[in-house]
Image: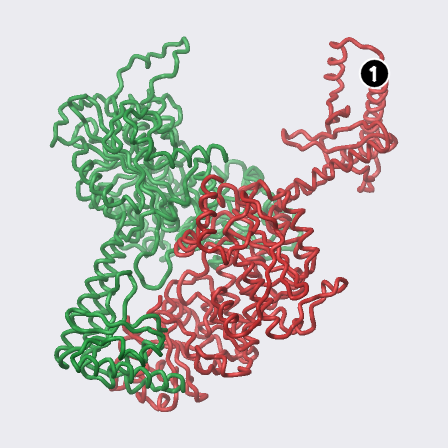
Amino acid sequence: MYFRRYFCSLTAAGHRRHYQRPVKQVIKSNFPETLSEIKESIFSSDFVAVSLQETGSYSAPWQKCLPIDTDETAYLKAKRAAERFQILQFSVCPFSVKASKLIANPYNFQLFPRHEVKVGMPSYSFSCQSSSLASMAQEGFDFNACIYNGISYMSRAQESAATVQTRSVLLNGGSLQSTSALSVADVIFSERIKTRVKNWINGCNNQHKTEDYLISSLRKLVERCENYGSRPSLIIDVCSERQVQLTSEALKEFVNIVLVRRPAKTGVEAVQVVLTSSEEDKNLLVKEIQDLEEEQKRLVSGFREVIDLISTSQRPVVVHNSLKDFAFIHEKFLAPLPPTTNEFSSSLLSVFPHILDVNHLMKELGLFDQMNNLSSAISYLDSRFSASIDMEVSYEEKTDCVDVHGHSVTKVCQLFVKLCSILKISLEIPEEGRTQLPALLQCSSNMFCSSDVRDPCNDDVRIWTSKSRTVSLRNLVFLWGFRRGMSAQDLKDVLCNSHDVFSEEFDVKMVDRTCAIVVFWTPGFSKSFLGIIDSGEVFSNKLGNMIFEGLKAADYETYRRVCKSDFWKPDLAECLAQATDETKVFSGAKMQQEKSVICWNNDEMINLDEL
Amino acid sequence: MRNTYMVRVLTRALQPVRSLCSAPSAADVELKNVTKANFEPALAELRRHVREADFVAIDLEMTGITSAPWREIFEFDRPDIQYLKVKDSAHKFAVVQFGVCPFRWDQHSTSFVAHPHNFYVFPRQEIAGDGSSYEFLCQTSSLEFLAKYQFDFNTCINEGISYLSRSQEEEALKCLDSIHKDEILDVSSNLRNVSDTQLVRMADILFAERMKNAVGEWRAGLLQGGSWGPESQGSLNDVNQKFQTTFFQTRPALAVNGLTSRQLKLIKLVTEKHFSDLAYVHVAGESSSRLPLIVYTDSAKDRDVLKGEVKACQRKAAEISIKSAIGFRHVIDLLSSERKLIVGHNCFLDLAHVYSKFIGPLPSTAEEFVSAVQTYFPSIVDTKVLLNSDDVLSHIMNKSSTSLSNAFNLLCLPPVAPTGTNNGSADIPRVKVDVQVDDQRFSNWNSGAKHEAGYDAFMTGCVFSEACFRLGIDFNPLAPGSILQHNEKLEKYINYLYLSWANGDIIDLKTGKCGPDTLGSAIGRRRWLAKFTFSNMILLWRLPTKLKAKDIRECFYKAFGSGSITSVHQMDETAAFVQFSRAELVSDFLELKDRLDRDNNNPMSVVHPLSRILETGCVRAATYETYKEVCLSPLSELLFADQAERLGMKGEARLVQSSVDVDGEDSHEGEGEITMPTFRELQQSSASVTTRNFQTDRIMDSLCRSAAQ
């Protein structure tokens, strides 16, 4: 494996030396050692940037997060993606800014949902978008390494549901929980155990008395003695949880023993009594067993340990696309995603108190969020603002585990620091206030915005776009059932002046190949238009023909219902048709309570030529 | 693991070197791996081999088998349910490796010659389809399984051969047609859009003006007759040197590079508005991207001619790209057109994959599916059916597993070092199989790479040839032209497949009929004893998780008397089937359950024996048809109960079509009666199979009777 990768990194380094900084690659084998390393690194830095690589992001064009989406529908789309797809690569980069220098320690974890502990966990199956895999392959992603040696994990919810190894192995002489009086049988059982252990301890202590080998091994067999490590131990069979408690109660008087629960692999439960030589020795053994348990737990939770570390450190988390990334993190490492945005953000914020979205900061700067490409965003900032940042990667280079993958996370760091310096936000945080955000960042944290309603602050930066306007959801109408291959312009031509409602200004954009959206800039027209389509009135013009041929229309509420339902089809038209068929009882009453505007932007719609 | 992997990588890396050696040892020569890079020559070679072959063995590796634990095929699954589960699997998972191994009988050496091919397949999207992405499911445990056998995922994803199914190809061509038609319409309503697009922004207006000047200068330069030398390039240099003079079909042209789509739109606008003799066109460049050009034409007529030419050219290019996207389907088309005998091992799922990936979406019923398969592959033989159905062969297998590798070891490999006991198989003559890889022939080849599709196909073919030999089929008359599948000893096994191994139902591809193994072997038939009367079955879901099948049985015995239920089958931790011994108990139970659910706190219902099952108050019960509806859904929740809930299944309070199950004799009607169509099913499928007609009549009768009552 290293053989292949060696070539790989050599060639890549030759081509793109400028952009590549060493990122530590972590797989199953070096995960335990990295864990302590990254722990130190997280706790000693001020921010943590993360970046994920998934097996896919959407199944059909309309299922992408579009400008027509409200926070709610955007969340539902992100939720669906997070439920279907899988994270294969997770990069973490703890970083700080010291004396206008970025100090970063990037790590790249290969993940694979291998069934380490229980079949079906963490994931029975997952979807792949072949284009996503192909583009990962182009970047040189090593699928073999990922599937053969990726780190598995379990979400918090799965771990508690699976109840794997939650019972402590160590019995700490807990008192009897049940208040029920001891029965005669219980007393006999306790007494018998006591005598047996007493005899056994005496036997162990008197071992200097020379004994025939045969006899000693016979005695061992009869008494069921075994060595626990280097210490002598005795095995006591029990048949119920109550007997376990009775045993531990009965053996309280013996000071130098440790009780260990034997895993009931064969169906017979047993308690193992381990004899220690002294108090110190006993403490040592207890510590040993606890460490072992910890290790076992670590194997179960796997990569989630890193998420837990980030969470307990309370460091601000910097991401590029917070809604998508945290939907994935929540689904895979915390618990299944809740049905609403509010529940999602409150659940998430209880784990990650400060989330900073680079995209959001870009918006603050007046750059719209179409700059999905990190590199182009960085080079754009470089060309426009003179804010060069020194980057120092503190991971020292080792050829065998430094690779070309996972650089997006360092780019996220870079972009974040650049944006902050342009926005005049100081990132140098005093030692004592690490969990506090700089005041200026405070206001921009935790915004899971897909489309927010702020007015553009300065127009001149928006060179790619014509002005965007907010539009009330009530003024949007979805159209479908037109001839295949019609463009937005064709539709607009047909609609223009075909009816009074189209005499004023309006816009048409395609959502996908089968569905278009019409924006009425005059309030009330959308309703009358829907009325016209519904009434089945016949016109003699082109619009009439189209209605006759099956043109359909629906309001935004129908679209919202589509997003809420479980049945997403590749074509939005089909979904909308189904949703309108199902019920027409929903009134728009609920709609008015929520934020009912989106940002209308002419250039942000899908360009079908580019699909 | 890592070591073995490294060894494999090294062997692969050294492969070309080794084949140069004069005397390669047979044991470690790899089979022919085919990827994107060597697909064309390999296909040409395969064409020759398949044409000469007597039969072709195939095998597939997929990214998964079941999309949820309850989607596994259970013994209590009716054939239509089994098909739905196979369909779901074939629809959702991807094929990553396709093994094809043509076998030819060589009379001179009296041996078979096999050409194992191992194709890496990946559903890459090569042409812009309808916008939806190509998506497939992976079952984590299947990927782990593939990883265990060192499957090379990188080769598959990077180098895998992509494909288009027949229906995808048709769709793409149709799409192309409609675009073409639109464009012809566009020409007639010429320049319609110009007035609509207004220059709103200052930057746009400036840019357009500059372009107008630049293009104008260029045109003027052309008309002056001189070659457009660098001295006149002044103004264009301002425009970032994005222009370059070339020729397009003997006309001078200006190539436009590196501008944004909006800028190109403006250039198009300017050209069409201000210059009647210039045409703005997109032509295919050297790379696949389209190159925008401004072409000088002599007249308006010449301009239209040019535009027409360009469009025809574009269409042709698009057609070519669709044709080339067919990719791996050429292999399937080859197998289909040569009409050779196809050999697989337990290959119903494989065929479903072949159909859904390379032909079209799977039909909704098994009957339609098999009849469609027959038109593409007229003769298919399944070695698993062969081994279990024939008395001689099942005697040799001696009740041991008929898994591929086991059958291969038993039948095709010489027994390992005689261990004293002579079971008589040591001196049985075997069929000789030589392997030919890239024109080298080996008589004792064993790549040993189990669960690699090419090798599995090879093993399947070996098992088949050996089985034929044991059946007493003489290969020697297999002169070119004579056909193996018409051999009378083999004929009775051809076109029979296991619908699923789990319950041994065999489907006849010729008729679409499906039933328990009737091919002759007593051993085969004895394997599956359980018989089900589906109308007596009740599906329970949202059960308490701790409940075991044993507990459920006890509760029912207490409530309805021992012997009231014949079996309990657990599907997963949330759902189970209960089979009652008598039909009327079904409705009795539903009524009782309804009553108990309604007064939950009534002391009577708390002490009722069923309360252990119903204690949560949310247990749902329904008939077998609900199970079918759940299986029909494209969703795949992990737990059955979740799936049913998401589909909005509420369960049934009482049996609506209880009268369908008539007198007790129906349930003993015999083995032939597997499907007992219920009312709903009758409504759904008007196409009833003729053999079922008498049944349907009776059911209709009983329905009428019940309506009258």
Residue B197 visible in rendering? yes
Task: Using the image as rendered, state which of residue A469 and residue A271 is in the foreground.
Answer: A469
- Residue A9, position in %: x, y? 47, 47
In what element is the residue under mark 1?
loop
Residue B698 visible in rendering? no
| Left or right relative to A389: residue B463 | left
Pointer 1 residue: A207
Give the answer, above or below, for where B19 lies relative to B40: above
- Residue B104, position in %: x, y? 20, 30
Snapshot quadrant of residue A7? top left
- Chain in green? B
Task: Using the image as rendered, state which of residue B492 and residue B278 is in the foreground.
Answer: B278
Amino acid at circle 1: Gln
Snapshot quadrant of residue A356? bottom right
Residue plotted at (27% across, 78% down): B231
Residue plotted at (57% across, 49% down): A24
- Residue A543, position in %: x, y? 29, 83
